Image (spheres, grey):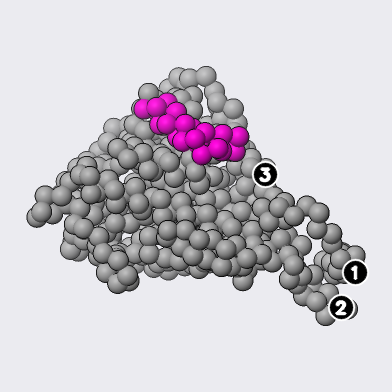
Amino acid sequence: MSSAPSALPSALHLAVALDGAGWHPAAWREPVARPRDLFTAGYWADLVTEAERGLLDFVTIEDALGLQSSHATEPDGRTDQVRGRLDAVLIAARVAPLTRHIGLVPTVVATHTEPFHISKAIATLDYVSTGRAGVRVQVSARRNEAAHFGRRTFPRIRGEDGESLDSPAVRELTADLFDEAADYIEVVRRLWDSWEDDAEIRSVATGRFIDRDRLHYIDFEGRHFSVKGPSITPRPPQGQPLVGALAHESATGAPFRLLGRSADIGYVTPHDADQARAVVASVRAEQDAAGRAEEPLHLFGDLVVFLDEDPAVAAARRERLDALAGHPYRSDARIFTGTPAQLADVLQELGQAGLTGFRLRPAVVGHDLPAITRGLVPELQRRDAFRRSYEADTLRGLLGLARPANRYAAADPAKAANPADTADAVTTA
């Protein structure tokens, strides 16, 4: 076993990002892959229960509004890689009753969906999972995805016209999409609070199910959304399910600004400890500028992992997968190839740079997810750097986050409860 840096406290957090057969495009061709099961409930239940076996904090489930593509902004027309997905929110809801502790964080695209619908869906997931829901919000500038809805169009970002990702037009579009996502999250959060915690009376004796005075119009008016409210779903068990987003360094600063303004969890992609320190500093500066310096914001580093007990075997497996794909695998995140002990060294080094957790992307789910839960986790436990049992039953609890007060109840502290309603609520709870 390799020597380790000084151990981190046991508050190190781990998540896995689940995407089809794995993050390498040739993962579905591995003997351990289950390509015929990708669109079955049992497949996803097996993955999440394995993640829970490893005491991981949560899983994220990838999703999009168009087919996967090897191109950054356009469809690629390939037929030799996995194409197609189940709905991430519905997968999470299906798996929730089969698990007890692990958080469930589906991905949603804010660009073309309505915040009212998503607030209701994630609130429902929080009820189904008894307080283990989160959501990862992403944006999309893909023209093919916009064409599904017919409400807006986007310019070609890379194509025959030579438009560059660094052009002024693309920078403006990127900033606008992330500003829209911030408004989206704000609407979702207000809708979660639009029912006070004691709005449901459920009194058979008085014939009152809800106290209408404890339901609130949110009256959100912004450049992107106009939403009256209230929600039709009572306030979720966690009060506010956790909101996260993936953010890369950008000339506009918009992705980090979104984390600072709106997120509970940020997924970032530094490739070494120095870059991690710089990323953490940038996000914390945005958090401070947004007036949220005292609010908790977890920053999880993303890594793609190829794990084997012998580093040479891991490297050979990656090379074989690259040959099947016809090109070397590249990622926005750091790609780690090696042993669980070597990965533990890397995570501890990055943790000392200010990251509070890590979201690992298994290159081949059937191989690398068990390598995380049965190899990496025991290694971290030996270093006293990871939990040995679940210490909470909610996702907020696992991440050490308090249940937030309802903003509308706090805005009217003088409001007195109806004594009869209070008594009924106690006797019928």
Q: Which residue is mark 3?
A: 402
**Would you say the residues marked 2 and 1 are in contact, meaning their CB atoms lie under 8 Å apart?**
yes
Q: Nearer the viewer, mark 1 or mark 3?
A: 1
Q: Could you tell me residue 220's position as x and y percent? A: 54, 61
Q: Which residue is mark 1?
A: 420
Helix, strand or loop: magenta stretch: helix
Relative side of 328 to 375, left or right: left
**Residue 271 falls in image quadrant:** top left
Query: At x 51% / y 39%, what residue is drawn?
Result: 290
Question: In this view of the protein, can residue 119 be seen by the observer?
Answer: yes
Q: Nearer the viewer, mark 3 or mark 2?
A: 2
Q: Is residue 376 above or below residue 33?
A: above
Residue type at mark 1 is: Ala
Query: At x 60% / y 42%, what residue is drawn?
Result: 399
Taking depth in this image into account, of 5 and 429 the one nearest to the observer is 429
Taking depth in this image into account, of 216 and 401 the one nearest to the observer is 216
Q: CA distance from mark 2 to mark 1?
A: 9 Å
User: Label 3 neighbourhood size at 10 Å, few (<14), some (14-19), many (20+)?
Assistant: few
Q: Which residue is mark 2?
A: 206
Relative side of 214 to 399, left or right: right
Secondary structure category for the residue under label 2:
loop
Q: The N terminus appears in which quarter of the rendering?
A: top left
Q: Earlier in the sequence, mark 2 or mark 1?
A: 2
**Residue 73 falls in image quadrant:** bottom left
Q: What are the residue bounds of the magenta stretch?
A: 275-296
Residue type at mark 2 is: Thr
Q: Could you tell me residue 175's position as x and y percent? A: 34, 47
Relative side of 163 to 399, left or right: left
Q: Earlier in the sequence, mark 1 or mark 3?
A: 3
Taking depth in this image into account, of 15 and 231 the one nearest to the observer is 231
